[in-house]
Amino acid sequence: MSTFDKTQLDSLLDVTASSTGTGQVMLDALVTALAEVAGADTVSIFELTPGDHSMRDLASVTLDGDAAGADDADTAGLFWAAYPDSVCSWTDTGSPWFGKHPASAPLAPETAYPTWRAFCESRMSRTYGRAVGLGHYAIIPLGSEPSTTRRVLVNRPAHDRAFTERETTMLRLIQPHLDSAVGRAVSGRPAREVLSPRELEILAYIRGGRSTRDIATTLWVSPSTVRKHLENVYTKLGVHSRTEAVAHVYGHRTTADEVVS
């Protein structure tokens, strides 16, 4: 099965670029589109709070009826018992895996082990992984509060293929788009409702091709003031460029070609 096919990738980016979609509808659309583009049987978006051993599922989809995905108390107990020493805790500063892989980058946990067999013998795989039907999986960390870790898990069955370096690179490239979309969905507010009137005004000028200096002259402010407004826009929308900001507000989506270029 081909993965990250251009047509499917464009469909995923259509969802992430929606300027009106919020809430559970957007989250459900995201996990479905990501499962299709990554050739996964299960995709879930969830939040972990290690301090109180809690886990909150935001959205999940299972395309293969054989996938388990149990979330009862006993299963959660297996996860938290294995978590502190597991590679899955690599984003936590107290983890023995912290610093061995960039905390903000997607990770296929099995790549931290010398062999697939060694990975399967790890406590997380033997207990929780077996209970919920994990196989070859990748974890995409998203922005969240300091005490919480928000993530996307993309899973394939154990009899399927592992995530290649190209595929984890593709997950890294679409990560900012997923992060922004999930943040908007969880907040329950469309992009245009998040920004102030002045921020929307500046984005309108940018959409029309105006430079920072041109906008500053038109608004009778300094270029640094325009740049500060843009920094606030990036923070509120969870984006990193003018192009992404305009896309999220006006619906001009990023294409697959722009992601991989």
Image: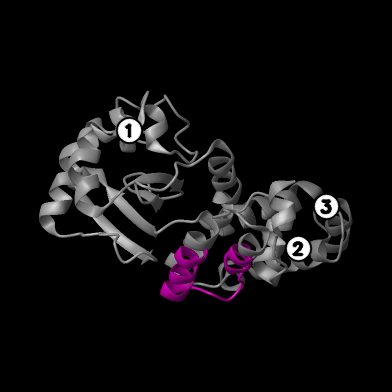
Indicate the quadrant where residue 56 lies.
Answer: bottom left
CA gap, disc 1 to disc 3?
44 Å
* Tag 1–tag 2 contact (CB < 8 Å): no
Position of residue 7 measured from the top left corner of the image (x, y, whole percent): 66, 64
Q: Which residues are magenta?
A: 11-33
Which image quadrant is residue 28 in? bottom left
Asked if 143 appears above or below 183 in the picture, the reply is above
Residue at position x 49%, y 56% from top? 39
- Amino acid at pointer 3: Thr
Q: Position of residue 4 (x, y in %)?
A: 60, 54
Per the image, label 2 sits on a secondary structure element best described as helix
Number of numbered discs on residues: 3
Q: Label 1 belongs to which residue?
A: 87
Residue type, mark 1 in image = Val
Q: Residue at x 12, y 57 (%)?
A: 73
Q: Is residue 220 left or right of residue 181?
A: right
The residue indicated by pointer 2 is 202
